[in-house]
Amino acid sequence: MKSTIAVDIGSSRMRAGSYTAKSNEPIQYNQIPTRSEGMPIEDRLVNLIESVWPEDYEVKSIAAACPGPLDPLNGIVVAPPNIPEWQYFPLQEFLHSTFNLPAAINKDANLAAYGEWSFGAGKGYSNLIYLTISTGIGGGFIIDDKLLTGNTGFAGEVGHMSVIPQGPVCSCGKEGHLEAIASGPAIVRWVKSRLEDETLLDHFPEGELTAKHISDAAETGNELAIAAYERAGKYIGLVIADLLHIFNTSLVIIGGGVSRAGDLLFNPIRKSVTESVLSDVYLDNLQILPAALGDNSGILGALVLSREIASDLSQ
Amino acid sequence: MKSTIAVDIGSSRMRAGSYTAKSNEPIQYNQIPTRSEGMPIEDRLVNLIESVWPEDYEVKSIAAACPGPLDPLNGIVVAPPNIPEWQYFPLQEFLHSTFNLPAAINKDANLAAYGEWSFGAGKGYSNLIYLTISTGIGGGFIIDDKLLTGNTGFAGEVGHMSVIPQGPVCSCGKEGHLEAIASGPAIVRWVKSRLEDETLLDHFPEGELTAKHISDAAETGNELAIAAYERAGKYIGLVIADLLHIFNTSLVIIGGGVSRAGDLLFNPIRKSVTESVLSDVYLDNLQILPAALGDNSGILGALVLSREIASDLSQ
């Protein structure tokens, strides 16, 4: 029997699974923290992959989702802000030479879009926009049944679209990008900047304030917390309207940790999109949906890619 | 001998040509003002097309470029701001039934992109971004050797990307769109708003101030005029950077009347793009070029479309 391996590398944890040609239930699955003292990330990655290597199956290929910016055409991790060890790391070649198998890599948001399109909220659509709202903001686009990669593989960086000129400084160093205004850390920063009487902090007296704390506070009616999500949703909606003007898709999928706030985020997004589009033609049959695969969008996208590069997965 | 007809409908003039299957030199060509008292635009259009009907050729198809928003899939002109008579006008069916020939229409900026890609600055590229900076700002995108049309045909509305939240009001009624900041009329409005001592007006004492007057003044060193183009170029560059983050193309073509200002506009655009991109990877091999076909981008794009829908153009 033949199998394929899919990997999803995040800044805090790495996950891997082995799969047959037909089922999305892994034969074996494992996840570990991305980092530990004394061992390089790539060695931990090798251990992780070996831990899901299926005994009774021949493995035919390996594909991995990894934070960008990333060059999928040459298989090089370029400059992931949260994995600074991997500046221009040739991850594809590393996987290929370590395991002597066809290997491929792509940006996490691209493969999450690919996963949602193949098995999730985007199944059956030829065109869709995928956004992930998390520590950062990323995107992936399916156009005419193909992943949009661009000339050198760096397409889809929705988080770095300019929203407020001379606005808050982004993780990339530029000003006013969507990621600097509506990502999880940006939501936290905005709340902190307005915490004059610190009443909100009563809800989480210990530890660091996170977007999840703020969404919990919003659920209990905290006005500042609600305003924080309304503000984030407004700017995400503005960028979605811009993207609809360009792509005119009928489907927008939103995933990532911050999107788990549900209506708290989706309602202001939908309101902002409706208010921001040039014409109602962009709203005809438009759906703005949460990602259906949750945490698995990325690894299942990597699975599709891994199946594509396997020379022969039949039997 | 067989032939095909291409039409370019603008808000001030309409142009038509008849062409063989192989040459872009028209067999016959004519242009007339779009409007005259006492005759509907569609009747003038019919007269124009008849005036270029070639005597010794069988005509096999007609295609027209027309201001948007426009539904190319159903061939309907939806709501062109400068041709208010044509609200939801079924132009494709009108051409088809009037001349009993295959007919097609598309948005002017889409067909200008198509023309530049087929015969102009974009020849040989599989992916490109085309912008037209004129009375309005429009766009067309070639992705994987296909025109991006979107789910219902309304893709490519670059002019209505949001640039300055709560910024100047756009022709569409929304605020802060690129068109409201960097189109010809927007450049004029900005200069007028700053004309405190009216020194600039010495250059054109009569008639209405236009973007051309301002570019002429800039050529003579007028600081306000130079600043107006620098401001427009800065925001156009910001939007181009956003589009590069999404599409990662290596070619951006800029056409339209305002682009004739040349370096006066292109230098601040290039500076702004360089300053605004997330990473230098978006600048690798990037070219930002003026449209090569000048006024003919649109009609030659319509020609490509007309040839595509002709059943048989050989001989």
Image: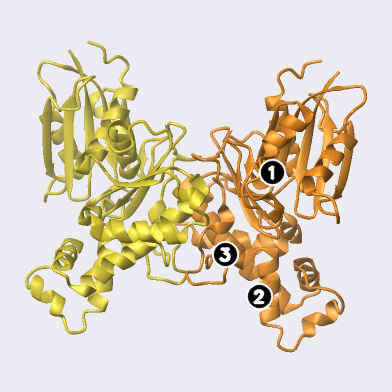
Chain colours: A yellow, B orange
Residue A234: image location, x then y, percent? 36, 63
Alpha carbon of mark 3 to alpha carbon of mark 2: how far?
A: 13 Å
The reply to whether label 3 and label 2 mark residues of one chain is yes
Disc number placed over residue B190 in the picture, else none: 2
Kind of element beneath mark 3: helix
Reply above or below: A22 against A159: above
Which residue is identified by label 3? B235
For the residue pair A258 and A3, the one nearer the viewer reads as A258
Which residue is identified by label 1? B112
Reply above or below: A200 against A48: below
Residue A58: image location, x then y, percent? 18, 16
Give the residue type at disc 2.
Answer: Trp
Kind of element beneath mark 2: helix
Q: Earlier along the polypeptide chain: callout 3 or callout 2? A: 2
What residue appears at the point 34 percent right and 58 percent down from the top-left corner?
A269
Residue B223: image location, x then y, percent? 72, 78
What residue appears at the point 34 percent right and 24 percent down from the top-left corner?
A308
Q: Are marks 3 and 1 in contact (CB under 8 Å)?
A: no
Give the residue type at disc 3.
Answer: Tyr
Q: Residues within 10 Å of mark 1 (few under 14, many from 20)?
A: many
Chain of the residue on which disc 1 is drawn: B
Kind of element beneath mark 1: helix
Q: Quadrant of residue B221?
A: bottom right
Is residue B247 something one can see in this rendering? Answer: yes
Q: Residues within 10 Å of mark 3 (few under 14, many from 20)?
A: many
